[in-house]
């Protein structure tokens, strides 16, 4: 029988959203978590949200670094978050070059649909947070609400797209986005 109360989830972009944007980040020692991010994840958890990181890692497809490099970065990132008591339920990554025309690179909503199927998530009650228009589109295409953060490329995206931004909300950073989510019905 299907769970009568499906989960709500927050899907979070990695670079520029949960970690400081660093061009093609691939070394654990370069991981800098956005201030207040761990505490924000803990708030989401307490409110009953599942939490996923959804990241485009075209640096792998471009040959700038390997999937093993990325996994080391992820282990380090999850370790740092864990030290502050924050956990995530999954990390989905697209390793492909943008020219590969894969079906998983954001703005594709594929990973949101995959997570929804695997974890019984109601996407209409879920959120996507990111610093790029592709993140916002992925959330919208999955039927979730999208929030732009002004960290990473967010400020530039905001200036470039203006009122055409496919966002339900614009927040200063990840903690501010989470505070907004917790106020929504
Ligand atoms: Mg980003
Ligand atoms: Zn892909």
Image (cartoon, rainbow, N blue to C red):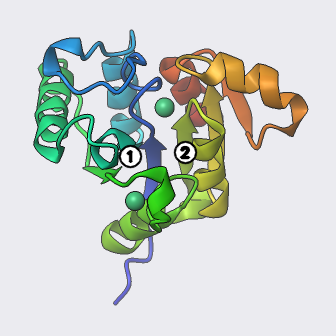
Crowding at mark 1 (Cα within 10 Å: few <14, some 14-19, many 20+): few
Judging by the rendered image, the residue that carries numbered circle 2 is: 128
The answer to whether residue 17 is above or below residue 108 is above
Residue in the image at 62% along x and 15% along y: 172
Q: Position of residue 25 (x, y in %)?
A: 30, 24
Counting every numbered tag in the picture gives 2
Give the camera-side residue of 164 and 174. 164
Question: Closer to us: mark 2 or mark 1?
Answer: 2
Q: Residue at x 49, y 56 (%)?
A: 99
Q: Give the position of the N terminus as an image quadrant.
A: bottom left
Please tell me in which quadrant of the rendered image residue 32 appears. top left
Name of the residue lying farthest toward the bottom: 1
- Residue furthest top in the image: 35
Q: Is residue 79 left or right of residue 159?
A: left
Figure check: 40 above or below 169: above
44, 138: nearer the viewer: 138
The crowding category of the residue bearing disc 2, from other C-alpha atoms within 10 Å (few below 14, some 14 to 19, many at least 20), is many
Q: Which residue is mark 1?
A: 48
At 41% from the left edge and 28% from the top edge, which residue is drawn?
Answer: 15
Mark number displayed over residue 80: none
Q: Is mark 1 within 8 Å of ligand 1?
A: no
């Amino acid at each position: 029988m299907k769970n009568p109360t499906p989960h709500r989830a927050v899907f979070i972009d990695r670079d520029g959203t949960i970690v400081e944007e660093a061009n093609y980040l691939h070394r654990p020692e370069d991981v800098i978590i956005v201030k207040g991010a761990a505490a924000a994840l803990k708030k989401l958890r307490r409110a009953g949200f599942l939490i996923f990181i959804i990241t485009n890692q075209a640096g792998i497809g471009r040959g700038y670094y390997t999937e093993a490099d990325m996994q080391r970065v992820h282990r380090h990132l999850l370790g740092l978050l864990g030290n502050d008591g924050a956990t995530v339920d999954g990390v989905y990554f697209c390793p492909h070059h943008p020219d590969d025309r894969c079906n998983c690179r954001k703005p594709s909503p594929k990973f949101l649909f995959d997570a929804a199927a695997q974890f019984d998530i109601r996407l209409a009650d879920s959120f996507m947070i990111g610093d790029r228009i592709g993140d916002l589109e992925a959330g919208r295409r999955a039927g979730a609400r999208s929030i732009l953060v002004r960290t990473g490329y967010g400020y530039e995206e905001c200036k470039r797209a203006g009122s055409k931004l496919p966002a339900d909300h614009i927040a200063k950073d990840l903690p501010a986005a989470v505070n907004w989510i917790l106020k929504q019905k």
